[in-house]
């Protein structure tokens, strides 16, 4: 089965919780294995197949808030761009990364640049991700460390983030994720994925801060299609659509 996606809400920048990303942090090993979107979150999971992924997301009733993402991977290299628009606020990021095989698993590195604009204010962040993935006594484990700097008269540190993921089972598959960020409480997420038929996979996810529930439906066609909705206690419903295409097959 070429699909390994589960759903959870997206958290990024000043507009955290306003949009939905199918593979943000939660369920790294469920959602990102062999996906070009691994370049954004866990570069160790970049795959060998040439794959293109396009995604768009928008909260219901918030026409001024849109999020879009484009990613391409090939031979364990990955490249991607994201854009977020919310009225006068705009955010654009560029990412590039590479995964490597080693005796006990995989290792990956990604570099990224982020530009944030709010009215007349313009800020830029340069950063890096380092990730690893391995299997230990039947558990699939992943670790990612993220850091960045604000360029300017003085270099100010970007909050350091550490994300841990674990996965167990075949069908259904369950994953538990926790993210630590300087100055914040840990974020816990639980996600599950179930293949109902060779063409249909469903998933669900629960985030605890704030409580959010998400539901995924994925069709293993050519191209692959993902549709997801999230229930948020303050923002209501957000939906996202993603399309993935691998012209030469999904070899990881």
Image (cartoon, rainbow, N blue to C red):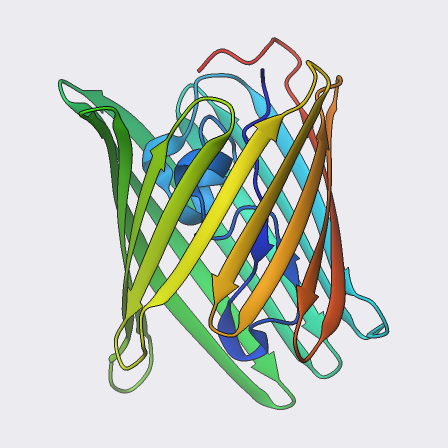
Give coordinates of residue 21: x percent, y percent: 60, 53
**At x 73% / y 56%, what residue is drawn?**
57
In this rendering, would 126 be left or right of 172?
left
Residue 199, x across and y down, in percent: 73, 18
Q: Is residue 179 above or below residue 107?
A: below
Quarter containing the N terminus:
top right
Q: Quadrant of residue 244?
A: top right
| Rendered position, 245 above or below 7 | above
Residue 170 location, quadrant: top left
Provide residue 131's location: percent of width, then percent of height: 27, 42
Q: Is residue 175 visible?
A: yes
State the residue in front, 171 or 243: 171
Number of residue marks? 0
Quadrant into which the C terminus falls: top left
Seen as rendered, the residue at the extreme bottom is: 120
Q: Residue at x 59, y 79 (%)?
A: 117
Q: Please identify the residue farthest to the left as the structure is shown.
A: 103
Mark yes or no: residue 32 visible. Answer: no
Looking at the image, which residue is at 43% across and 56% down?
Answer: 189
Q: Position of residue 102 (x, y in %)?
A: 17, 21
| Image: 73 above or below 157 | above
């Amino acid at each position: 089965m070429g699909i390994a996606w589960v759903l959870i809400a997206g958290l990024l920048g000043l507009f955290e919780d306003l949009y939905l990303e199918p593979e943000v942090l939660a369920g790294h090993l469920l959602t990102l294995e062999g996906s070009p979107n691994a370049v954004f979150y866990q570069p160790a999971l970049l795959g060998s197949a040439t794959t293109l992924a396009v995604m768009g997301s928008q909260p219901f009733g918030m026409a001024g808030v849109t999020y879009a993402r484009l990613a391409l991977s090939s031979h364990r290299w990955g490249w991607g761009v994201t854009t977020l628009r919310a009225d006068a606020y705009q955010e654009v990021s560029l990412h590039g990364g590479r995964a490597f095989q080693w005796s006990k698993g995989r290792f990956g590195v990604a570099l990224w640049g982020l530009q944030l604009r709010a009215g007349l204010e313009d800020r830029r962040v340069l950063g890096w991700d380092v990730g690893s993935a391995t299997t230990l006594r039947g558990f699939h484990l992943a670790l990612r460390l993220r850091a960045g700097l604000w360029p300017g008269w003085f270099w100010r540190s970007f909050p350091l983030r550490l994300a841990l993921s674990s996965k167990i089972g075949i069908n259904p598959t369950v994953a538990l994720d926790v993210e630590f960020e300087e100055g914040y409480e840990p974020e816990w997420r639980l996600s599950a994925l179930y293949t109902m038929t060779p063409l249909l996979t469903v998933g669900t996810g629960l985030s605890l801060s704030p409580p959010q529930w998400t539901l995924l439906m994925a069709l293993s066609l050519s191209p692959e299609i993902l549709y997801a909705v999230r229930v948020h206690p303050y923002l209501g419903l957000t939906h996202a659509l993603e399309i993935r295409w691998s012209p030469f097959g999904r070899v990881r």
